[in-house]
Structures are given as C-alpha cells and as structure tokens.
Image: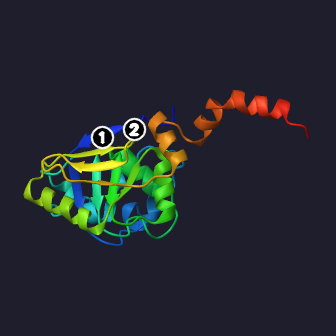
Amino acid sequence: MAYDKFDILKSTAVPLPLENVDTDQIIPARFLKATERKGFGDNLFRDWRYNADNTPKEQFVLNNPIYSGKILVGGKNFGSGSSREHAAWAIYDYGFRAVVSSFFADIFRNNCLNIGVLPVQVSAEFLQKIFSAIEADPDTMLEIHLENQVIRLLDSGEQESFQINDYKKENMLNGFDDIDYLINIKEEIRSFTENTPL
C-alpha cells in the first residue's frame, strides 16, 4: 500500500487564512534536493515558521500550540506556482491528511491525490464558516467523509459536498497509488492482453 486508506477523517484543523499560497512558500526551493518523500515536513512553510537563526516565529500558526490536527485549512488559490511534488510531500510528511480551500492549483491538487492527501474544495462561503468556527474555538472538529464526498462542521452540523475524480477517489479509499492500482488489476490486464488480437 502506498499510504493509509482514507475514508472518514475526524480532526481539529490548523487555519492558514492566506490567499495565493504558492509551492515555494509551502516548501522553499533550497530544500528540494532529496528524492525520497521523507523529512520534508520539517521544512513545511520553513521561511514563515522560522527566523534566520532557526528560532520559531511565535506568530506563525504552526508554532501556536492551540492549533493542531490532520486538516490544514488554507485560503483561496492554495498550491499555485511551480509544479513541485515536494509541496504535497511536505504537507503529508508534516502529518496533514487533508487540505481545505476554496480553490486549488490543478497540479498541486493532483500531486496531493497521488500521495494520499485529500484536497477538499469548498465554496468561499463555507470556507469562511470554517475559519470563523476555528477562530471561535480552536478545538472545532471537522469531519471529512470521502465515500459520501461531504465535509462537515461537527458542532453545528453544517456541511457541504465536494468533488473528486472517481479514479482518484477509489485509489484513496484503498490506499493505492497508480502503481498499486495497476498491480491490483494485473489479472484483468493479463486476460485482456491474452484475449485481444494484435
């Protein structure tokens, strides 16, 4: 299995109400030397999290102990900029399993889906409800139900549906990447090959 199966995620969330967060802000280019997915979480939002002397910036949300959880809530146009896979790797390696925004850059969205991070696109109005709920109570719980394609604020019961590609949805429900998917249908591929004339 490429990553953990994703079905229902119940978690508190970390709010980052900034628009146009690009991949260089998510993981600065100087940290792209490694080719494995491990270790990138240490440098997630590196220049926003740390001063030049590597001391944490207290005002940045990831350094604020009142916020935690497996869901990152970002502003509009999250993941814009260059197509680096490392941005999704850093989010996953840090411990996030879903990112919520009112708009994602397409390449970033696909990179997330390829490694088991669910990008949940909601309306601007519902996104603001989430931010307001977290601001009022950092322990606000969100529930993301992948099978039903619904995100819900558990306290109020308010919810909204979201879209996802059927193929990617099935892969996430099973914890498959593209290679796992092909391995899973290898007998069908073999049968097709043997029974299809050249």
- Amino acid type, mark 1: Leu
Circle 1 crowding by C-alpha within 10 Å: few under 14, some 14–19, many from 20:
some
What colour scheme was applied to this rendering of the protein? Answer: rainbow
Q: Where is residue 131 drawn, in percent x and y?
A: 19, 61
Residue at the left extreme of this rendering: 136
Left or right, 35 with reference to 49:
right
- Against 23, is 68 above or below? above
Q: Give the numbered dot on residue 9.
A: 1
Name the residue rendered at 21%, 65% in the picture. Answer: 128
- The image shows residue 1, relative to residue 52, as above or below, that is above
Q: Nearer the viewer, residue 167 or 62?
A: 167
Relative height, residue 104 to residue 192 (above, below): below
Q: Quadrant of residue 80?
A: bottom left
Report which quarter residue 182 is drawn in. Answer: top right
Residue 180 falls left or right of residue 164: right
Q: Is residue 136 visible?
A: yes
Q: Residue at x 12, y 60 (%)?
A: 135
Residue type at numbered disc 2: Phe
Question: How far apart in space, not on screen, are marks 2 and 1 (Cα)?
Answer: 7 Å
Residue drawn at x 40%, y 60% is 27
The number of callouts visible is: 2
Q: Is residue 163 above or below residue 147?
A: below
Q: Nearer the viewer, residue 90 or 6?
A: 6
Percent x, y for residue 121? 37, 59
Mark 2 touches mark 1? (CB < 8 Å): yes
Q: Kindly indicate the quadrant of the structure image that contains residue 18.
A: bottom left
Disc 2: CA contacts within 10 A as few (<14), some (14-19) or many (>=20): many
Name the residue at 77% across, 30% down.
Answer: 190
Asked whether residue 55 is in view, the answer is no
The x and y percentages for residue 34 are: 51, 50
Which residue carries the number 2 mark? 6
